[in-house]
Amino acid sequence: MTKPTPFDFVFDYLPTGIMVKKMFGMHYIYLGKKIMLILRRSDKQPEWNGVWVATSKEHHQSLKSNVPELGPFIMDGDDRHSNWLLLQNDTEDFEGAAIKVCELIAHGDARIGKVTGGL
């Protein structure tokens, strides 16, 4: 039995043409050749649960000004910030913040998304 897609409300706010690919227990959201988001909910390492936003460090500050709930994505105690931002699922107004991110994507915000060979 496959696990349902976590936070599936986001699909109501994303543009048509997205593709979902399940890998490593997570759901990767693509638009064209760009990865846009990863949806993750797991009992293992719950601090990584939520919506991962594909971006670049140069866009972190401006995206956080639009969606203040976004935080850094830090793995295994490494204090260096990655290119990803994380909207943790236990954040106050998680759903509202996730909708804001999806609306940015739907409006073609160039700060979100990274070209990948994943498709």
Image (cartoon, rainbow, N blue to C red):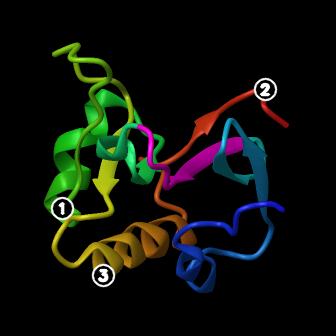
Q: Which span of residues is magenta-colored?
A: 34-44
**Residue 96 circle label:** 3
Q: Quadrant of residue 115?
A: top right
Would you say the magenta stretch is mainly helix, strand or loop?
strand
Residue 91, percent from left and from top: 20, 65
- Identify residue for label 1: 69
Q: Label 1 neighbourhood size at 10 Å, few (<14), some (14-19), many (20+)?
A: some
Residue 96, percent from left and from top: 30, 81
Amino acid type, mark 1: Glu
Going from the N terminus, do you reach mark 2 or mark 3 first? 3
Q: Label 2 neighbourhood size at 10 Å, few (<14), some (14-19), many (20+)?
A: few
Quadrant for the C terminus in the image: top right
Going from the N terminus, do you reach mark 1 or mark 2 first? 1
**Whole-Å distance between the Cαs marked 1 and 3?**
10 Å
Amino acid type, mark 3: Gly
Residue at position x 64%, y 43% in the image? 35
Magenta stretch: includes residue 35: yes
Say above or below: 79 vs 13.
above
Q: Quadrant of residue 89?
A: bottom left
